[in-house]
Image (cartoon, rainbow, N blue to C red):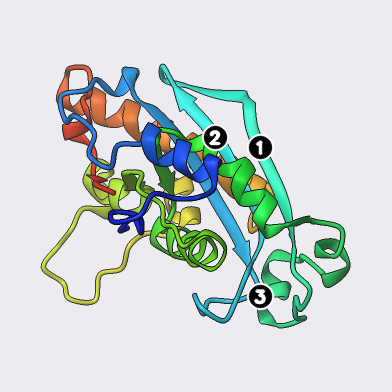
Amino acid sequence: MNWKFWKRPPSNPVVAAYREATSPRPARKTPVADARFVILDCETSGFDIQANRILSLAIAEVSKGRLRIAKSRSWTVFQEDAPINKAVAIHGILPSQTAGGQPETEVLLEFLPCIHDAILVGHHIRFDIAMLNASLERHYRAALRNPTLDTAAFAMTSIEAFAKTAYPGQHEPSLEEVCAQCKIAPLERHTAEGDTFTTAQIFLSMCALHQRHLGRPLTLADLPVLNG
C-alpha cells in the first residue's frame, strides 16, 4: 500500500493529517491490549477493482480487548451508475439505496480520521483495501498506509482446524467457517455493518484463543500483521 506523496505533500488537509498520524510499521513489541484496531468491510458493485465501486462501508473499533460500539460508523456511498448485477443478489444494495448515499469524496474524508494510526482488520481484507485505494487514488491521488490484519490468515495460525498443510489446494477459511469454529452466529451476512461486527467478534475470539495457547499476553509480533 504505497503512499503517493513522497515527493509532493497532499493538498487536502484531511488527507495530510491522516498521513502525519499514521505509521505503516507498528512496533512489534506493542502489547495487543495497547493497540487500536479498526475492523472494516466494504460492499461493492462487483469484484473488478478499477471498474467497480464501493456501495457501502462500515467500521468498528477494537481497543483494550473490547469492541467499542459507540465508535462504529457506516456509510452508504452515492454511485451514479450503480448496476443491478450478481453482486446485488449477494448484498441486496439497490441503485435506489445508493442514490440517497453520500458522495464518495465525503465518505473518504470522514473515514480517514477514524483510522489514524490504527491496524485495519478484515476478512479477506486485501480486496477491501484495494477498493479503498482505488477510490482514494481517483479522488485524492492517495493510498492507505495502515498496517493490516486478515482474519482469514489469523484463523490459519490460531485455529487448529485451519492450520496450514502441504496440500496445494488448501484455501483460506470463509467467514462462515471461522464463525462455526468460534461458535459465533454471523450477523446480517453480506452487509457492511453485519460483516464488520461479525469480523470484530471472531477477531476478539481468536485473540483470546491464541493468548490461551501461548500462555501469556499477546504482542503484535504474535499476530499476522502486515506493514502498510
Q: Residue at x 49, y 67 (%)?
A: 134
Residue 109 can be seen in this image:
yes
Of 135 and 199, nearer the camera is 135
Q: Are marks 1 and 2 in contact (CB under 8 Å)?
A: yes
Q: Is residue 191 visible?
A: no
Residue furthest left as drawn: 166
Distance Cα–Cα, label 1 vs label 3: 23 Å
- For the residue pair 105 and 27, the one nearer the viewer reads as 105
Task: Give the residue pinned by disc 2.
Answer: 114
Residues marked 1 and 3 touching at CB (< 8 Å): no
Mark 1 or mark 2: which comes first in sequence? 1
Q: How many marks?
A: 3
Please identify the quarter of the rendering in which residue 130 is found.
bottom left
Q: Which residue is mark 3?
A: 87
Tell me the quarter of the image containing the N terminus. bottom left
Give the residue displayed 58% in from the left and 41% down from the top. 59
In the picture, the disc for residue 73 is 1
Q: Position of residue 169 (x, y in %)?
A: 24, 76
Left/right of residue 83 with respect to residue 33 in the rendered view: right
- Nearest to N terminus: mark 2 or mark 3: 3
Circle 2: residue type: Cys
Amino acid on which disc 3 is placed: Ala
Coordinates of residue 38 in the picture (x, y in percent): 47, 36
